[in-house]
Amino acid sequence: MARLSFWKHLAVGAVCAGLVAGLGCHGTHEHKDYSHHNVADVPVPKELNKVTLPPYVVETPDILMIDAIRIIPLPPYRVEPLDVLFISGTNVFESAPINGMYAVDPDGTVNLGPAYGGSLRVVDMTTDEIQKIMVQRVRTYAKNAEITVSLAQSRGVQMIAGQHIIRPDGTVGLGSYGAVYVAGMTLAQAKQAIEAHLSRYLYRPEISLDVYAFNSKYYYVITDMAGYGENVVRLPHTGNETVLDAISNIGGLSSVSSKKIWVARPAPTECGHDQILPVDWKGITRRGQVMTNYQVLPGDRVYILSQPMTKFDTYVARMLSPFNRIMGSILIGGAMANTLSSHPGNNSNNNGGVVIGAGF
């Protein structure tokens, strides 16, 4: 990649990139020559001029935190295991009052205590039906007792509330209420979609929604390893990183890295231009300049080029390696031949002395 192309397309790419706040993509007929502009003139966010990102769009595999605010089943509701009933009694034994929350056990019963006969089966009944059979039960022990029963909490709250990961198909699971597609939505849109889905089962449901774990937004730091491949590190995006932060997250520059660094920012395909932002490494580190310490956005590639001489040395060593192996094999073969030719008894002089064969 020619170095001049960085400067030629820098400002044009900045206009095309949809991630930069306040900028949009324009047709090619509106493009102008910005090659004479200084890096500081390009309207991209930097260390002391950062921008806030647009509303967060949830994607796989983000984790959402859902809290149920109003979960009222549509009537007539039949009680299920793990529901919670509010039961209030008057004219009952003072030593065994009936007033409070009573959970429906997994076997479908509510335990009123030994003073009133223990457990009473209530599953698959409405609250009115439960109230009638409960009055009959309690009046066998306290003749003038009056009982009122209401639903305090549906087990649906337990299924909805909590952490929900966005599945690979873009949905979140809501237990027995099914799944809702939320990928590609903002939090407000996802909240509306979930509440609309729950309204088929609940009366005017209301939830609060937030992101528990931001798992879908990344940027990349790519290090050229001087002829030994390229090292790619994917880092989670928090919305506040700069180029200096990105390189510090990988432990700084490697021993083969040069000071030639740039940010490659994805642009909409219809723009037809790459957005390349050259980085003045010495400026942002040794002189504290902020002109090229760009704010890193989701999807950015921070590329670190290797030292040219180190890469050249690697290529030369790679080219000479086969010849070194061949020469090594020849030398080993010559040494073996020399050893065999100098074996006692092969060549002798008149005095019985051993003649040492000439080697290579």
Image (cartoon, helix red, strand yellow):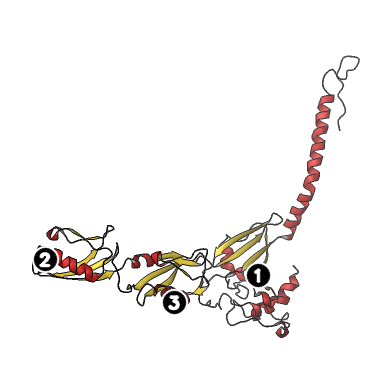
Q: Earlier in the sequence, mark 2 or mark 3?
A: 2
Quarter of the C terminus within the rendering: top right
Residue extending furthest toward the bottom:
30
Q: CA distance from mark 1 to mark 2?
A: 79 Å
Residue 216: x and y in percent read 53, 66
Q: Could you tell which of marks 1 and 3 lies nearer the N-terminus?
A: 3
Could you tell me if residue 213 is visible in this image?
Answer: no
Foreground mark, 2 or 3? Answer: 2
Q: Amino acid at mark 2?
A: Arg
- Seen from the viewer's position, the closer of residues 112 and 265 is 112
Q: Residue at x 41, y 68 (%)?
A: 65
Say what amino acid the circle numbered 1 marks: Ala
Q: Secondary structure at mark 1?
A: strand
Per the rendering, the mark at residue 56 is none
Tell me the element at label 2: helix
Q: Nearer the viewer, mark 1 or mark 3?
A: 3
One can see residue 271 in this view = yes
Q: Is residue 19 left or right of residue 162?
A: right
> Quick one: label 3, few (<14), some, or many (20+) residues within 10 Å?
some
Examine the rendered structure and indicate whether residue 229 appears above or below residue 71.
above
Q: Are marks 2 and 3 in contact (CB under 8 Å)?
A: no
* Residue occupied by mark 2: 139
What residue would you read off at disc 1?
Answer: 264
Q: How many marks?
A: 3
* Residue type indicated by callout 3: Gln
Rendered image: mark on residue 192: 3
Judged from the image, the secondary structure of the residue bearing numbered disc 3 is: helix
Rendering coords of residue 170 (x, y %): 51, 67
Residue 299: x percent and y percent?
60, 69
